[in-house]
Image: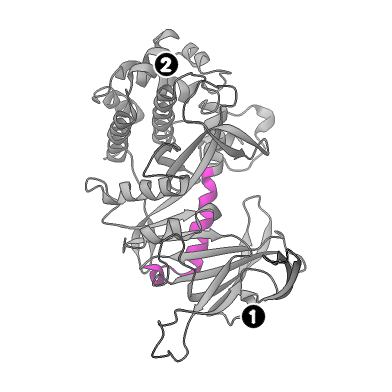
Amino acid sequence: KKHSLEEICQALLCLPIPRIKAFVNLVMASCSHLDSKSFVGITSSPHCHYSYSNISKVSEYLSKDEENYEKIMKILLDFFLDVCSIPTYKSVELGNYFRFAQDMTMVDKSHSACLSGRVYGHQSNKNSIVSGYKVCCTHIDLGKSWSVPIKMDVFSPTDLVQTDSTLLAVYQLKYLLDATDLPFGDSFCVNSADSAYGNAKFLSPLYKYDKLVNVVRLRGGSKVYKAFSGEQKEKQNPKIYGQTYYLIDKTVTKTFKSKNKKTKEDIWTEKLQTSIIDCACDEFIEEPIVLGNGKKGVKKIWCWKNLLIRTKNKNSMKDKPFDLLKVEIWNEDKSKKIFDRDMFLSVNGQSKDKVSTQESYENYRGRFGVEPCYRFSKQHLFLGKFQTPDKQHFLNHLLIVFASWWVLYAAKDEIVLECPVWQKYLPVKRHIYPFSYF
């Protein structure tokens, strides 16, 4: 049954969450008062019936610690999955499946020296290294550019289990797939992630899930291997890795400098780097494409089956083959590349053969919905502007951001975008979603 936005907001008030009335009011206000310049400014929304002083009370009492934060986020996730329509994607081999995307956004807290657990990270809009919080998110793709978070965590350098943001992403997927009361564990899921997760640390522990397929970008210049197919020697461990290939456009010879440990003299060594393009591909696709900005082009996709990467830090990859895709985007007459840097994608998982080359590319292409999600969260939901001296208060604000996204998604079919006369130049109205502001 499809629920109206009013029914969803009324049902939210019945959840066993501290300060639930004030919490729901802040969520409704943050969704409806997008012109506010600060988080306190949303209290002037007609949907907010509390004074600005209640913001500090919600921030303090919503959850007391990180364990309580996890419980409340689980309550909210269960609620929204139950009352909102969750579409699935269809595949010939997989049937109906869920589409995930994972990424991390940096929240600048350089000015907050009293905040605990800050780390250094790169912030793309400033193109600089800042001190703050890494917010790691797992999103579910709900179609029509809706990439809504279903798990949000702050990376903590003192955590003994998730010692970096990559392991935190692994933890989030395991959490979603292992939960018996969530619909993801029994269904096929295709997860997309950028090159920060294209390593054995991320891919190896997730290989055990037979219904999970990861489409992850690999860094240019990385090494991949064919499986060894020669004769094995009796008195020797069996060889696993065969010919080495590099993820580069063409085969090159590079010169490397090193030092002799005894004489301290410089040693120059030449090394041949064989491009993956010199290896015969198993599949090739060339077809027209329309980019997000409306430009037409041609995409070329090469596919190599059952390649390997090296085991690293005890994360075994020798028995976990993957498919490699090389993607090039050319202009319409194929005279020039639209993107100078080619894209290399790995398709990992026990069910990887059930996802076609075209579907793998389309799944990864849908990952870019997380970028406007972060931008909208920082510009309109105050993910980056919420000021507090306490980390737990910041986590409680993440709960408001989390719930706001689901309320916005629930409202998408009930709101109408009213444009000024001078902006009504499009022949057909676009589907309503927050990214229309960009």
From the viewer's perspective, tell me whether residue 82 is left or right of residue 330.
left
Identified by mark 2, the residue type is: His
The residue to which callout 2 is attached is 47
Q: Position of residue 12 (x, y in %)?
A: 29, 26
Whether residue 334 is visible, yes or no, is no
Separation of residues labelled 1 and 2 (CA atoms):
62 Å
The residue type indicated by label 1 comes to: Asp
Give the foreground label among 1 and 2.
1
Q: Which mark is residue 278?
A: 1
**Which comes before the other along the chain, label 1 or label 2?**
2
Whether residue 41 appears in this view of the structure is yes
| Relative height, residue 189 to residue 285 (above, below) | above
The residues colored magenta run 351-370
Query: What element does badge 1 sit on?
Result: helix
> Which residue is located at x 55 percent, y 18 percent?
38
Of 210 and 148, which appears nearest the observer?
A: 210
Residue 368 place in picture, x, y as percent: 55, 49
Residue 247, x across and y down, in percent? 62, 68
Crowd class of label 1 (few under 14; some 14 to 19; many from 20; radius 10 Å): few
Residue 259 appears in which quarter of the rendering? Answer: bottom right
Main SS type for the magenta part? helix
Query: Residue placed at 57% from the left, 28% from the top?
Result: 379
